[in-house]
Image (spheres, rainbow, N blue to C red):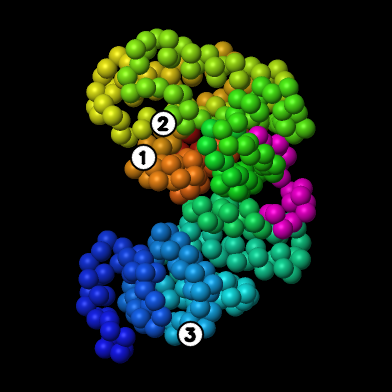
């Protein structure tokens, strides 16, 4: 097969096998190939590298959709060639069957795939089960449980969007939830990609969220305009998601005190308008300190350095919010640091589409937001476990 297709299959597989995640690298190489060469290499890679993780699962999902859209005959040939070739090959077969419109067969295969990546693997299974339940018009309680578990297990943006699409196929308000919320998402960038992840994450938290995505760059206008579209929505909660560029800080401010005071005062005025006009909870995102700056490390040292001022603004926002009932600060800076700032923001996506943060970062942010919303609505609970008869602990604690 190698000679026939002009491909040193064994040598290429040996090279791929040296990578930290050989299956992921193999999938990406296969995506750049064409025709029978791709079919031969992909079959061999899936058989040789049977263990998969979240990133490889996402890559397989993308590749399966591309194969089905570009060459359905080749997709079917691959699906047949992979039979009995191991866990990764079985997952790929299931994904190919799913995009080919055979959900029942796909679900049966997914049930046999071992959990190499417990979270994403479980999400894929539950999504397949949920699709079947929706198609068969199963009881809403069963659909609701399966969808909520899929949303809780989902790691990738794609999986959360799949949950959101299934929610959209059902009658609004038909699935049980602890609270229905009208959520206004306002910001300075493109917000369309946020809404699906946010709805799915809220549903996982027991919240049925009706999400209004504000127009590009119209955060202040939608809050302050006399004929604001939020008047019709009457939002329960408003998210103000500004990125650090929206503050307009130069690399080095001439008057640092004035820059900090003006930034906080402008946001505080928006909070008060939201509270007075609609009585909405306000979730203000603080500002990520970018991992790069024109002044380098001096950005945090210079009195007017942008990095230093962004940190000062973040501290001032917490102080200001503490004095404003119903206003909460979501620590975007910490969220970005935990996720990894190198992948939190994609400069290319920002300059081409004003997308911030990168789609891969949205699940982490959506979950953080859903958890804060749940707490602010009073839906969180604390449990006090008492061991009054000394069953669990002896000694002083038991007494």
Task: Name the residue located 36 percent from the left edge and 66 percent from the top edge.
Answer: 28
Sequence-first disc among 1 and 2: 2
Q: CA distance from mark 3 to mark 2?
A: 48 Å
Q: Residues within 10 Å of mark 2 (few under 14, many from 20)?
A: many
> Quick one: 396 or 190, which is closer to the camera?
190
Residue 96 is at least partly visible in this image = no
Q: Quadrant of residue 233?
A: top right
Q: Considering the numbered disc 2 on the image, is that residue within a helix, a strand or a loop?
A: loop
Quarter the N terminus occupies: bottom left
**227 part of magenta stretch:** no
**As drawn, 310 above or below 56:** above
Task: Name the residue located 76 percent from the left edge and 66 percent from the top edge.
Answer: 137
Residue 65 is at least partly visible in this image = yes
Q: Which mark is residue 341?
A: 1
Q: Considering the numbered disc 1 on the image, is that residue within a helix, a strand or a loop?
A: helix
> Quick one: 39 or 340, which is closer to the camera?
39
Which residue has dot 3 on it?
Answer: 77
Direction from residue 356 to residue 15 in the image, left or right: left
Which residue has dot 2 on it?
Answer: 288
Residue 337: image location, x then y, percent:
37, 36
Q: Residues within 10 Å of mark 1 (few under 14, many from 20)?
A: many
Q: Considering the numbered disc 3 on the image, is that residue within a helix, a strand or a loop?
A: helix
In magenta, the rendered stretch is: 167-185
Residue 243: image location, x then y, percent:
47, 31
Q: CA distance from mark 3 to mark 1?
A: 41 Å
Task: Name the residue located 53 percent from the left edge and 13 percent from the top edge.
Answer: 265
Direction from residue 88 to residue 291 in the image, left or right: left
Which residue, as the protein is rendered here, is positioned at the far front?
A: 352
Looking at the image, do the residues carrying marks 1 and 2 touch, with CB atoms under 8 Å apart? yes
Q: CA distance from mark 1 to mark 2?
A: 9 Å
């Amino acid at each position: 097969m190698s000679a026939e297709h002009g491909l040193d299959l064994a040598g290429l597989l040996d090279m791929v096998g040296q990578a930290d995640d050989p299956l992921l690298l193999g999938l990406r190489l296969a995506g750049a190939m064409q025709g029978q060469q791709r079919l031969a290499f992909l079959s061999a890679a899936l058989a040789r590298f049977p263990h998969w993780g979240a990133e490889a699962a996402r890559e397989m999902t993308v590749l399966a959709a591309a194969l089905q859209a570009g060459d359905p005959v080749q997709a079917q040939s691959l699906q047949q060639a992979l039979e009995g070739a191991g866990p990764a090959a079985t997952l790929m077969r299931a994904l190919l069957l799913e995009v080919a419109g055979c959900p029942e067969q796909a679900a049966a295969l997914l049930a046999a795939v071992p959990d190499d990546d417990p979270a994403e693997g479980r999400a894929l299974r539950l999504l397949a089960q949920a699709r079947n339940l929706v198609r068969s018009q199963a009881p809403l309680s069963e659909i609701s449980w399966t969808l909520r578990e899929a949303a809780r297990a989902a790691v990738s943006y794609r999986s959360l969007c799949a949950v959101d699409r299934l929610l959209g196929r059902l009658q609004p308000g038909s699935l049980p939830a602890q609270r229905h919320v009208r959520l206004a998402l306002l910001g300075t960038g493109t917000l369309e990609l946020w809404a699906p992840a946010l709805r799915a994450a809220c549903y996982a938290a027991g919240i049925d969220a009706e999400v209004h995505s504000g127009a590009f760059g119209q955060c202040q206008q939608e809050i302050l305009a006399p004929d604001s579209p939020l008047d019709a929505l009457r939002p329960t909660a408003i998210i103000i998601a500004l990125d650090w560029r929206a503050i307009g800080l130069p690399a080095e401010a001439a008057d640092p005190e004035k820059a900090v005071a003006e930034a906080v005062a402008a946001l505080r005025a928006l909070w008060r308008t939201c509270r007075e006009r609609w009585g909405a909870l306000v979730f203000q995102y603080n500002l990520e300190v970018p991992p790069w700056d024109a002044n380098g490390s001096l950005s945090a040292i210079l009195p007017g350095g942008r990095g230093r001022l962004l940190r000062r603004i973040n501290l001032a926002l917490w102080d200001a919010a503490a004095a404003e009932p119903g206003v909460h600060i979501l620590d975007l800076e910490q969220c970005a640091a935990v996720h990894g700032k190198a992948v939190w923001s994609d400069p290319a996506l920002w300059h081409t589409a004003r997308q911030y943060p990168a789609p891969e970062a949205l699940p982490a942010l959506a979950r953080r937001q859903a958890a804060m919303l749940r707490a602010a609505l009073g839906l969180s609970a604390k449990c006090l476990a008492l061991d009054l008869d000394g069953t669990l602990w002896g000694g002083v604690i038991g007494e």
